[in-house]
Image (cartoon, helix red, strand yellow):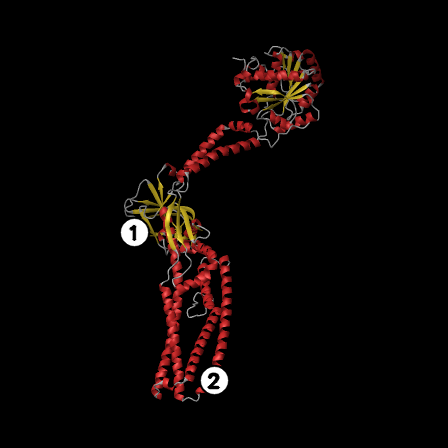
Amino acid sequence: MEPRAMNSDELDLSLLFFRLRARWPLYVASLVVAGTLAFLYLKVKAPVYDFQSTMLLGNQSSGSKRAQELLNLLEVKDRGIKMEDEIGLIKSGGMVKQALQRLPQFMVSYYAVPNTWLNQLRDLQVRERPTGSVPFRVVPDMAAPQLSGTRVQVEVLPDGRYRLTAKGKKATLSSLPTGEMVREVLDFNLDQVVKAGEPLHHPLLSVTLLPEPGVPADGSERYSFNLNDLNTLTGDYAGRLAVRAIDHESRIIELSTKGTVPLKEEQFLDTLMSVFISADLHEKNLTGSKTVSFLDGEIAKLNRDRQQSAAALSTFRATRGVVDVGAQSSSGIQQLSNLEVERSRIESQRKFYETLLHTVRTSHDMSALSASGVNEPVLSSLILQLADLSNQKAGLVVNASDRNPLVTVLDERIRTTKTSLEQNLKSLIRSSDFQLADLTTQLSRIRGDMSRMPENERQLAVLKTKSDFNDKNYNFLIEKRAEAAIALATNATDKKVIDHAAMSGGGPSAPKPLFVMLIALLAGVFGPTGVALLLEKANQRIRSKEDLLRVTNIPMLGVVAHGTKHDREVMLTSPKGPIAESFRSIRVNLQYLSAGLDKKVLGVTSSVPGEGKTFCAVNLATELAHSGRRVALVETDLRRPTVAGYFELDPTAPGLADYLAGLNNLEECLRPSPVKRLDVLLCGEVPPNPTELLESPRMATLMERLRDEYDYVLLDTPPVGYVSEYFVLLRHLDANVYVVRQNYTDKALLSQIDELHREQKIKHVYIIINDVRFEKTYEYRHKQKAYAYGYS
C-alpha cells in the first residue's frame, strides 16, 4: 500500500494563513525594514519634475507665393513622413548639441549637501542647484582638458578663498567643448586653495571661481560642482527628451523632459525650440540666397554682352552714316530679326539645359540648384524637389551614418529625382535641337532674300537684332531676380512656439510618497510571505500527521505534547499535565490496536538520536504502570544509556550488560523505580561489544523470563538509522513503537522503516509524534488547552 498523496491542486487557505500567522515576527521585522527603507528613500531621492512645451510645425511653406505653391505641390504626398522626419530631427543629437552650445552654464553642475544626520557617514541627500544659487560661480577654461564627471568639493574659506578637493580611483580628462577624452587618470587626489577671481591651473583642473553676489555661504550646507563635457550633456538630455505628435493628423508636437532642476529643464526646452526654428529659417534663407547669387552672376554676364552690342551698334551707325533703320527695313528684315531672337533664346535655353544636365551628372551637392529662369513647370518642380531632398540629407547626415534608414530613403529619392531630371533635360535638349534646325532652315531662306538688300542695312539689322536680344534677356533676368529677392525678403519659418516650457502637474512627479509607501507595504507583506512559503516548501521535516501520510502508511499511535521543564520534571509522579495526558491517550490507543493480540513486548525506537525515544519509552512504561500493569523497562541501547537519569538511579550499578556478560544475575541487575509496579533494567557499564551481547542466548532467556513475570516489557532500543542492534532485538518484539519528533525528524529518515513495513519484515509497528507544539500545528491547534481540561 502506497502512502496517500495530497492533491497538489487543492489550496487550503486556512492552513496557509495558519502557517503564515506563526511567522508574525518576520512580518513585523519586514514591515519595519521596508518602512525604514521607504522613509530613507524619500529623504535621499531628489524630487524629479516633468516639463512640457508645444510647437507648431506648419505646412513647410516659404515666404514666396510661387515657392509656396511649388513646395506644397511637392510635399503634399509626403506630409506624414515629413512629420516623422521633423520629430526625428528635433530629437537628434545634433539639434540637442546645438541647443546646449547656447547654454554654456550647463557645463557646470552645482550641488549642495545639507549637514543632516543622513549625510554624516556619506553624502546621501545631495541636491543639484541651478547657476546662481550657490555662493560661487565656476568659470572653466574651455581650451584646457578638465576633470569631467567627478564631483569637486568646495569649501568656502573666510578670507575670500576656496578650497577645492577631489579624490578617487579613476576619472577622465576631457575637452569640454568637444567631449573628446584626453586621457584617463588613476588614483588622483586634488587639494588646492585658490583666491576668488584668480585662475587655478592644475593638471586636473583649470577653472576660475567667482563669488556669487547676494548668495552668502551657509554653514548648514556643503557645496560641490561637476564639470560636464558636451557629449555627456548631449547624451543625458537627448535620453530624457521625448517628442510626440498630439494627434495622428495634427502638426502640433509636444516636447517633454524631466529633471531635478526646474530652471535648467525650462531653459533647455525653450532653447531647443528656438534653435530648431532658427535652423529651419536659416535653411530657407540659404536656398533663397543661392538663387539670388546665381541670378546676379547671370545678369552681370548678360549686362556685359548688352553693353558690347550697344557699343557695336553705335560704332556702326557712326562709321556708316546709317541713321533711320526703320525706313530701310522691310518685312524680311523684321522676320529675320524675330527668328534671330527666337533662335538666340532657344540656344541660350539649350545651353542652360546642357549646363544644368552637366551639373546634375557631376555634382554631388544639389542644394545649390535653382529653378529661377525655368519656365517649364515639370523641370522647375524636379529642380526644387532635388534641392529640397539634398538639403534634407545634408541636415540628417550631420548626426547619422550612411546606413541610417532615413539616409538610405533620401538617397533613393535623390537618385530617382536625378534620373527623372536627366531624362527631362535630355528631352528638352532634343526638342531645342529640333527647333534650332527648323529656325536655321527659315533663316537660310530669309537670308537668301536679304542678300539682295544693301550691305549697310543688312549689317545694321543684324546688330539691332543682337542688341534687342540682349535687352530682352536682361530684362527677363532682372524680373526673375526681383522675384527671388522678394521671396528671400519675405521668407518666414512656418514653425512657431505655442506653449513655452512649463512644469506639468504643479509638483514633483517622483518620488511619490503614497506610491513608495504602498510599494514598501507590499514588499513588507509579500516579501516575508514568499520567504515563508519558500521555507515551508524547503522544510523536509515531519510537522504533522499530514506529513506522515505523505511518506508512509504506518498507523499513528498518537502525539506527545511539548511540555515545560517543570512538566518533564514531574511527569513520572504527576498524572496531570499535557505530557501525562498525551501518554495516557497513547496507552489507550495501544491497547485498542492490540485488542485480541498478545503484544507484551514493545520496542521503542527512532531514526536518529535526539528524537525522544528514551523519553517516550520511560513515559509509556510509567503510564502502563499507572494503569495497574506490572511493567519492566529494559534499556537495550548499550551505546548511549540515558534511562538512569529519568529515575535518578545510579548508572554505574550492575545492569543488562553485566547480566548478559554473566557477571551478575537478574535479581542483582533488575531494580524497582520510583513508579509503583515499574521495574527498570538499566544498561550498567557501557560494554565494548553491545551487538554480541544482545545476540547471546542469555538475552533470549531474559526475554522469556520477563514475559512470564510482567504484563508489559518495554525495550528502549538503539536508533534504527545508526546501528544494527535494533534488528537483532526485532525477533523478541511483539510490537514496535517508532518515535519521530516534530520539526526534527527528516522525512527521508522514514524511508528505511517504511520499506521494512511495506515488505512486511516488521509487523505491528506504530508511530508516535513527539514534542508537538499544538499552538504551531494546524491540525492539532484545538488541543492547545484540551489536556488541561478537568484539572485546576
Q: Nearer the viewer, mark 2 or mark 1?
A: 2
Residue 413 appears in the rendering? yes
Spot occupied by residue 104 in the image (x, y as percentages of width and height): 36, 53
Question: Secondary structure beneath disc 2?
Answer: helix
Residue in the foreground of this view, choosing between 454 and 775: 454
Label 1, residues with CA under 10 Å away: few <14, some 14-19, many ≥20: some
- Dividing the picture into quadrants, the one containing residue 729 is top right
Question: Secondary structure beneath disc 1?
Answer: loop
Left or right: residue 535 versus residue 719 is left
Amino acid, disc 1: Gly
Residue 568 appears in the rendering? no
Spot occupied by residue 271 in the image (x, y as percentages of width and height): 37, 53
Q: Residue at (43%, 34%) from the top-left corner?
A: 36
Residue in the foreground of this view, choosing between 349 and 746: 349
- Report the number of discs: 2
Seen in the picture, residue 387 relative to 669 is either above or below; the reply is below
Residue in the foreground of this view, choosing between 658 and 366: 366
Separation of marks 2 and 1 at Cα, in angstroms? 91 Å
Spot occupied by residue 487 in the image (x, y as percentages of width and height): 38, 65
Spot occupied by residue 9 in the image (x, y as percentages of width and height): 60, 32
Q: In this figure, which residue is indicated by the disc labeled 1?
A: 197
Seen in the picture, residue 9 relative to 299 is either above or below; the reply is above
Q: Name the image quarter holding the N terminus.
A: top right
Amino acid, disc 2: Arg
Checking the image for residue 445, the label placed there is 2
Question: Is label 2 in contact with label 1 (beta carbons under 8 Å)?
Answer: no
Residue farthest along the right direction in this orientation: 697
- Dividing the picture into quadrants, the one containing residue 710 is top right
Q: Residue at (46%, 37%) from the top-left corner?
A: 519
Label 2, residues with CA under 10 Å away: few <14, some 14-19, many ≥20: few
Closer to the chain start, of discs 2 and 1, is 1
Checking the image for residue 711, the label placed there is none
